[in-house]
Amino acid sequence: NAGVTQTPKFRVLKTGQSMTLLCAQDMNHEYMYWYRQDPGMGLRLIHYSVGEGTTAKGEVPDGYNVSRLKKQNFLLGLESAAPSQTSVYFCASSYSPQGQGLNTEAFFGQGTRLTVV
Amino acid sequence: DAKTTQPTSMDCAEGRAANLPCNHSTISGNEYVYWYRQIHSQGPQYIIHGLKNNETNEMASLIITEDRKSSTLILPHATLRDTAVYYCIVRPLDQTGANNLFFGTGTRLTVIP
């Protein structure tokens, strides 16, 4: 059981380049999320998804797009990378039984360290 | 969303209990208290959560005051591996998922040999 796996672990981009970060989970979770973490700050939510084919904006969505074509995968795209997007990106997933309103723990990946020069 | 206040940093001697406080004076009746931790360069890890009763699991204990305005996470026998940033988070009972997990800056716990 791998849990939440992020690809790649490290990446350096030039300003204006595009890239996609992949998050995969093997726990059959409905909910998936992308966070970013900057030095000295906590995690901030970029986008999230409550199920296959659905996405929603989080706290800091500008400059990012996401897709959830398959339940197990959540992709984060940067169409035109900027130095301000230099950060560590974390993906997470959680299980949320329909209609039961339960609070469940979130499982996080190990992070992708992205540097935009 | 209710805000939390935590000390910026704390030290604890190895083998002793680590008591991490959190103030959440504006917490609502339908909000849980969650604790996560983040070991250097790793993703956050869930520790424990509770509503109003004290909770204990294999990792830690959570003590919530009767008025629910503050709580304490207790690591009973701290080890060097417990050195991490600890986040106290409050979130509504009726909201599922982690889209409403608001991470602040947390408490940096250093366990000293």
Image (cartoon, coloured by chain):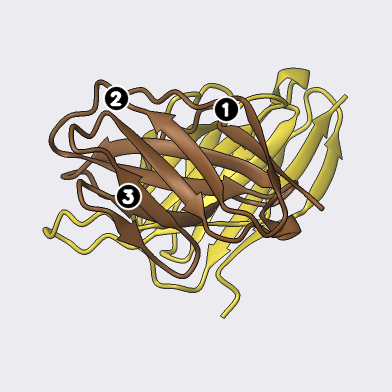
Q: Earlier in the sequence, mark 1 or mark 2?
A: 2
**Circle 1 residue:** B105
Image coordinates of residue B79 in percent, x first then y, are: 70, 60
Q: Examine the image and state in which quarter residue B80 appears.
A: bottom right
From the viewer's perspective, is residue A40 above or below residue A12? above
Image coordinates of residue A68 in percent, x first then y, are: 44, 53
**Circle 3 residue:** B97
- One can see residue A71 in this view: yes
- One can see residue A75 in this view: no
Residue at 29% x, 43% y: name it: B64
- Within 10 angstroms of label 3, few (less than 14), some, or many (20 or more) residues? many
Residue at 50% x, 73% y: name it: A26
Image coordinates of residue A47 in percent, x first then y, are: 45, 37
**Circle 2 residue:** B2
Q: Is residue B51 left or right of residue B48?
A: left
Q: Examine the image and state in which quarter residue B31 appears.
A: top left
